[in-house]
Image (cartoon, grey):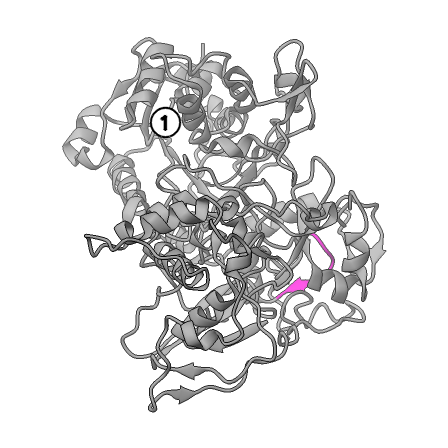
Amino acid sequence: SVCKENKNNFLRQFFSSLSVSATIQKSTTTHAAVNGDMSVGEGLSEHNSGLEMTNENSPLTAAEPPSPFCPKQNGGAASPADESENSIRRKRSRKRSDTEEDSAWDSSYSHVLNFKHSCPEPWLLSDPGVMCILQVSADKLDSITAFPKFFNQSSYTKLASYRRAIFQALEVASIRAEKTFPPSESDSLEEQIKPMLDWAHNGFLPKGQEGLKPRENAAEYCVFPLASESSVLLDPIPPEFPPSAKRPRLSLCKSSHMCDYSCSWTRVATFHPLFEGGLCLTCKDVYLEISYMYDDDGYQSYCTVCCGGREVLLCGNANCCRCFCVDCLDILVGAGAANSARDLDPWRCYMCQPLQQYGVLKKRHDWSLKLQEFFVNDSGQEFESPKMYPAVPAEQRRPIRVLSLFDGIATGYLVLRDLGFKVDVYIASEVCEDSISVGVVRHEGRIQYVHDVRNITRKNIAEWGPFDLVIGGSPCNDLSIVNPARKGLYEGTGRLFFEFYRLLSEAKPKEGEDRPFFWMFENVVAMSVNDKRDISRFLECNPVMIDAIEVSAAHRARYFWGNLPGMKRPLCSSGMNKLELQDCLEHGRVAKFGKVRTITTRSNSIKQGKDQHFPVMMNGKEDILWCTELERIFGFPVHYTDVSNMGRGARQKLLGRSWSVPVIRHLFAPLKDYYACE
């Protein structure tokens, strides 16, 4: 149900049910509508990054948006023991490790305690200016006696709102069970709640479940004061969800005039890259931001068709990472299509099924080319074509001089040497000591490290230069739309892009210098359209999107800006590329999947599929990918990161931040017409 209520009365109703949500659908959303001086982020997150949802920043302009700006849902919830297999398949549930990186997003709402209510009465508003809009699934509730199972220590440690909610719930439970606790010597919430937590974890003894049942008159022991006479009376809660704004479509014959997906807007700006039909300008921007956004389980965060969706169905094909929302299935494919898909196990999505029309949904026969064209032709701004340099005669070519910013584990140097380039100078800016160790050991001191990019001055560039190639990829933490706490391009690590721009401007040939000069900047695809266009405006060119899946055994979609020759040419694999996971494994190990999803710095990115399987079988058991296998997937030599006694986790972090070697080979190869090679 969707309801509007006063925050305190919401908690009162919530705790009187004393139920813990076993799982929360991926579709669950929580928003705060704010008046006056109230905090925008209240009720959303402990971060000060809450955003008011509008049609302009919503992933869906039609159905209720599952905002990418909100914290991840159901991060740590586990399914109840009696949940059916089909329910697990169709309702996404994710687990969150307590050891995840500090930069990971807030998972406070992965363990929100839900409530259900019958025949709701009008709500009293005692805090004018605050309304909560909450969507909950009433059929996924469990008894509070399951408290030890669903209690999340990570959220409890990090989030004050979570601690307050737990305290208030256990306070009501203690009143019902007539349980008393010794008075606390401290006024802090943490000290008061400690004995309550012990009581809850031990099974609410001595009365147990019987003592927690609600009394006939719950108002007698409600811990929240009744509203004052001046309270405002809100309208009764709507009995059901508002109807979806998506309209049933009979055909796509008007695709030249109407946005066929999500919003039915009457102005089409471009084609849909995967299915026949068009997208309006708003939906186009949403698709650019969201289409390469993935969750912890490796699946797309939102629907493949509309990049939104309240509830999504996951494709059962082991090598597919797509999902489709029930709205798109019921409206575009046909009424009841979602329920029919739920009954199939495994269900194959419409990108994996044979090429034919399903309702009005028809996959393009050339969708892979259209997808590339969709990103290449995203000319939010038009720029002059970059200067093209004529090839240098072989006898006049000289060794290349390179400035690498945010160098990582020296992927650029490795590729240049593999391609046979003579490297005169390779200046690398890097602050990670482990990354520097890899570069120093593996390249035997041929790289000159200069540490923090912010400390490099115009004088330094003049002393080290001139440079023929400037490359870099600033950290994506504050740019990636996956991170709801991101600070954007102008704050946090996002600002480091401007260091690249500053040093690129200094390294460019001065007026009158007639020599080839090339540069390349890389970053994540799943970034805000506004950030992407700001970067393009500074660099005066639009990016090329390249996914390493074409030349390796793993997905890795990235944007590349630059003036390298042939950047927009098709990505073609060669005989040396390891295209299948099996090709990357050690002897005696068997791949369960042909390819793997994007490998990040997080350990759980290794798991595959909706059931979170490890990708390798060895001696009849599932196993993780070994470090040597990860290196092969990225295209690095075996044991490339095996320095300084680094553990597996540290090595995966280095690889998770690195570039895909075959992709960089593809981009650097045309430079052989300009610089000396061995």
Under circle 1, the secondary element is loop
| Relative side of 463 to 420, left or right | left
Q: Position of residue 62 (x, y in %)?
A: 60, 70
**What residue type is disc 1 on?**
Gly
Front residue (pair 82, 396): 82
Q: Residue 14: x and y, percent?
A: 48, 67
Residue at 50% x, 24% y is: 661
Q: Main secondary structure of the magenta part?
A: loop
Q: Label 1 belongs to which residue?
A: 408
Looking at the rendering, which quadrant does residue 413 occupy? Answer: top left
Residue 438, image x, y percentages: 36, 16
Instruction: Please tell me how crowded label 1 is: few (under 14), some (14-19), or many (20+) other residues with Cα within 10 Å.
Output: many
* On-image quarter of the C terminus: top left
Q: Which residues are magenta?
A: 274-279
Estimate the x, y position of residue 397 in percent, counting from the top left.
40, 18
Q: Residue at x 81, y 51 (%)?
A: 343
Which of 46/577 is in front? 46
